[in-house]
Amino acid sequence: MHNINSNIFLIGMMGSGKTTIGRILARKMKKQFIDSDHEIELRTGAKIPLIFEIEGEIGFRKREAKVISELTSLKNIVLATGGGVILSEKNRRFLKERGIVVYLQASVNSLVQRTSYDSNRPLIKSKNPKSSIEKLIFQRKSLYEEIADIKLESGRPNVQLLVQKIITTLNKEQFK
């Protein structure tokens, strides 16, 4: 059973607000904030697109799995995960067993808007980013839902309100 002192793991599509919300949530809850993609970049000394270019998605996912295994073992953290973290059954198990999983959902249009100018997103670098995002959501939605303890719509722009909603939900009986 998880409680308010549990780790909090944010999952969802790229552009759903995991890093932005995670930083503020961690500060308000006096937890350490970690972004798994940033951690991978720190450890490799390379940006995610370069890792994809050199090692392909399979190489990146191996690195991601190692980082997720280590980070989910830490205590008192808020972890923003990469959008594809849930593709690995082992990652899903670690996230589910080692903390409270918050799934941030956003509409396709929100995601396109938030990610279209970001060159750091190798999986949607295409002539039609909207179509790429739709395909990824189709592939991942059920996996996100499978491990989510809390599901929230992150399409609304008020980040503070969303953070407060997460904290309020975490203070409910099932998380104590």
Image (spheres, helix red, strand yellow):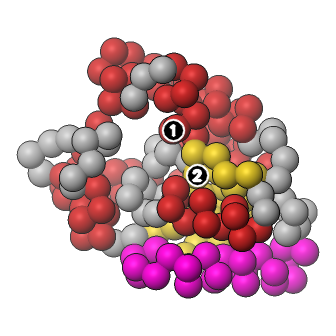
Q: Which residue is at 58% across, 40% downward?
A: 36
Question: Label 1, label 2: how many angstroms apart (C-alpha)?
Answer: 8 Å
Question: Which circle marks residue 68 in the picture?
Answer: none
Tell me the quarter of the picture where residue 125 sits.
Answer: top left
Decide: few, some or many residues near mark 1? Use Cα within 10 Å; few <14, some 14-19, many ≥20.
Answer: many
**Quarter of the image that includes the C terminus:** bottom right
Question: Which circle marks residue 80 in the picture?
Answer: 2
Q: Position of residue 3 (x, y in %)?
A: 88, 67
Q: Position of residue 25 (x, y in %)?
A: 66, 67
In the image, 147 versus 65, the foreground residue is 65
**136 vs 17: above or below:** above
Whether residue 83 appears in magenta in the rendering, the answer is no
Tell me the quarter of the picture where residue 13 sits.
Answer: bottom left
Decide: few, some or many residues near mark 2? Use Cα within 10 Å; few <14, some 14-19, many ≥20.
Answer: many
Q: Which residue is at 71% across, 33% downward?
A: 69
**124 vs 102: above or below:** above
Q: Are marks 1 and 2 in contact (CB under 8 Å)?
A: yes
Whether residue 167 appears in magenta in the rendering, the answer is yes
Q: Does residue 106 appear in this view?
A: yes
Q: Please, what secondary structure does the residue beneath circle 2 have?
A: strand
**39 vs 83: above or below:** above
Residue picked out by circle 1: 37
Q: Which residue is at 69% across, 61% downward?
A: 26
Q: Earlier in the sequence, mark 1 or mark 2?
A: 1
Write the start and end of the magenta stretch as one range.
153-176
Question: What's under tag 2, amino acid-wise?
Answer: Ala
Q: Please, what secondary structure does the residue beneath circle 1 have?
A: helix
Q: Position of residue 73 (x, y in %)?
A: 81, 39
Left or right of 124? Residue 138 is right
Question: What's under tag 1, amino acid-wise?
Answer: Asp
Q: Does residue 123 appear in this view?
A: no
